[in-house]
Amino acid sequence: MEYNLADLFESVVDVVPDREALVYVDHPGTGEERRLTYSELDAAANRIAHHLIGAGLRPGEHLGLHLYNGVEYLQTVLACLKARIVPVNVNYRYVEEELVHLYRDADLAALVFDAEFTGRVAAALTQTEKLRHLVRVGAPPADAPALDCVPFAEAEASGPPGRGFAPRSPDDLFIIYTGGTTGLPKGVLWRQEDLFFAGLFGGDPSGEPVKRPEELAERVAAGGAGITFFPAPPLMHGTSTLTAFIALNYGQRVVLHRKYVPEEVLRTLEKEKVSSISLVGDAMLRPLVDALRGPLRGTDLSALFSLSSSGAIMSETVRAELQELMPNVLVLNNFGSTESGSNGRATDDSGPARGFRLHVNERTQVVDPATRAPVAPGETGRLAQRGHVPLGYYNDPAKTAETFFERDGVRWVLLGDMATVDENGVVTVLGRGSQCINTGGEKVYPEEVEQALKSHPDVYDALVAGVPDARWGSHVAAVVQLRDGAGPLDLESLQAHCRRQLAGYKVPRQLVLTHRVQRSPSGKADYRWARAVAVEADAEAP
């Protein structure tokens, strides 16, 4: 056996077949609840895998998952891995034009989609030449267009529950598309062995990676049940799917909700005795704080050991609120990317005054983006990671050449985050270079300003963007969502608050109040939207 994700999963199934693997709760909605053991999940995935093979899908072809969270999502990902078909995540918020780009860019040959999206899929399908096999989950709306597709239940029933698959390889692929909030989405191309070590911690996030593939199942057999993981964001966000696979590698239990509803999440934490929950940044965490302070005050979280955030920065303000409400829970502010997996974890002294500071792993460095050499302490560079990194971006050789490089015979990925490093190896992340605002010759990174804004008692959420300015080149604009019931907030008082934490040139010169800050379904910042809102408000200002 080699480091192939399907082989590894099956090895775990074989030692704990009757252990509960997956709990799915449909909240809000029908209240449907499904529970599958490891052997049941394995058989369900086998059925879909055999259906796909029977439908003519070949090893190496790509299948899109245009789905909400559910049993079908993980079942289909596992089916793809078993059949050596490449799974590709699809953002379910995308409209026709965006779907056409992704379907075509990813060279999708098959698609599994939720019935709710039938209209969008039908519209995009006419412009997508290679997509030839469709499987639909659920019944379509009454007004949905006719579409030649196979109902998921029929697809599942058509395949046998046994395995009997061809041998697999650690070189089998897994594609994760980035969110595309700063440009068109890009497909990050992972070898499964590299993803196992970079994104799944080699089978053990808290200890030593396994030294050989068989060791994964041996550890599961020697341990016991009792740990429950709850990836709360959409599974189409890479972090959430990887969290589910971390749990399966442990031989433990995964809990899923169809959609993120904070009050229902808290009820499930209590009911299912969840041990570890993962979320994405303030957009998911602030509503959880509100629910704990309000209608769900007193929820029993005694089983919860850790709460982690990754994929978007958790502000120090929110982290402190969570720690106050969950004093016995380990609150982790993790940092990573689709291109690198995990890079590190925020220090205890992170915050608006000192910046977002990280204890990074031994594979992460801050390098000069031109020479690719490590920077000296105090100098600015870009984060980079070596070793188990992706092969590149699918269908984008130019971006691949720009982002991936070799140094001393070792492969590296150059990330988009600007950073500095101190004498002790602690990294301070400044922000995405692509979002850097040049104002009067000074560089301002939105994330730093957003941390300061969110520490204001009336600010619920905020994004920062640069707006063209005749005098300064660009000025810093704050797009702010106020807390419910907060009083009026003006630019002058917001500036006074920010000046206590930021240099003068970083303080916003424009304030735009919005009913709701727009983010991706997983909570990531939508800077294109923020800039458009700020530019429009600036143009309308007297």
Image: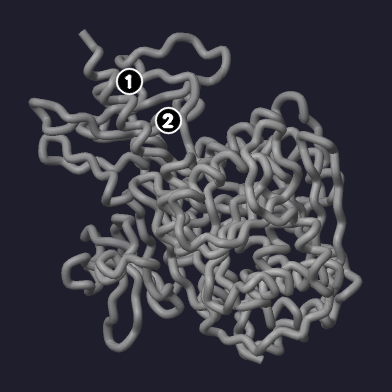
Left or right of residue 113: residue 441: left
Q: Residue at x 52, y 56 (%)?
A: 334
Q: Nearer the viewer, residue 380 or 8?
A: 8
- Picture residue at 77% right of the left edge, 54% below the top: 255
318 left or right of 148 in image = left
**In-image side of 72 versus 518 (left or right):** right
Which of 478/326 is in front? 478
Q: Secondary structure at mark 1?
A: strand
Which residue was labeled with disc 2? 462
Mark 1 crowdedness (10 Å alpha carbons): few <14, some 14-19, many ≥20 = many
- Looking at the rendered structure, the kind of residue marked 2 is Ala
Q: CA distance from mark 1 to mark 2?
A: 10 Å
Q: Specify the quadrant that holds the N terminus.
A: bottom right
Tag 2, which secondary structure? strand
User: From the viewer's perspective, is residue 356 above or below residue 53?
Assistant: above
- Classify 102 as above or below 534: below
Query: For this view, does 295 lie left or right of residue 534?
Result: right
| Residue 312, horizontal then vertical, whole percent | 48, 47
Residue at the extreme left of the image, as rendered: 471
Question: Vertically, is 197 above or below 263?
Answer: below
Say above or below: 437 vs 427: above
User: Observer-nearest residue: 366 or 190?
Assistant: 190
Where residue 47 appears, as percent x and y from the top left, is 78, 70
Residue at position x 41%, y 13% in the image: 489
- Could you tell me the amino acid type at mark 1? Leu
- For marks 1 and 2, the one nearer the N-term is 2
Evaluate whether residue 423 shows in this view. Answer: no
> x and y percent of residue 450 in the render?
39, 35
Q: Dot 1 corresponds to which residue?
A: 511
Residue 311 seen by the camera: yes
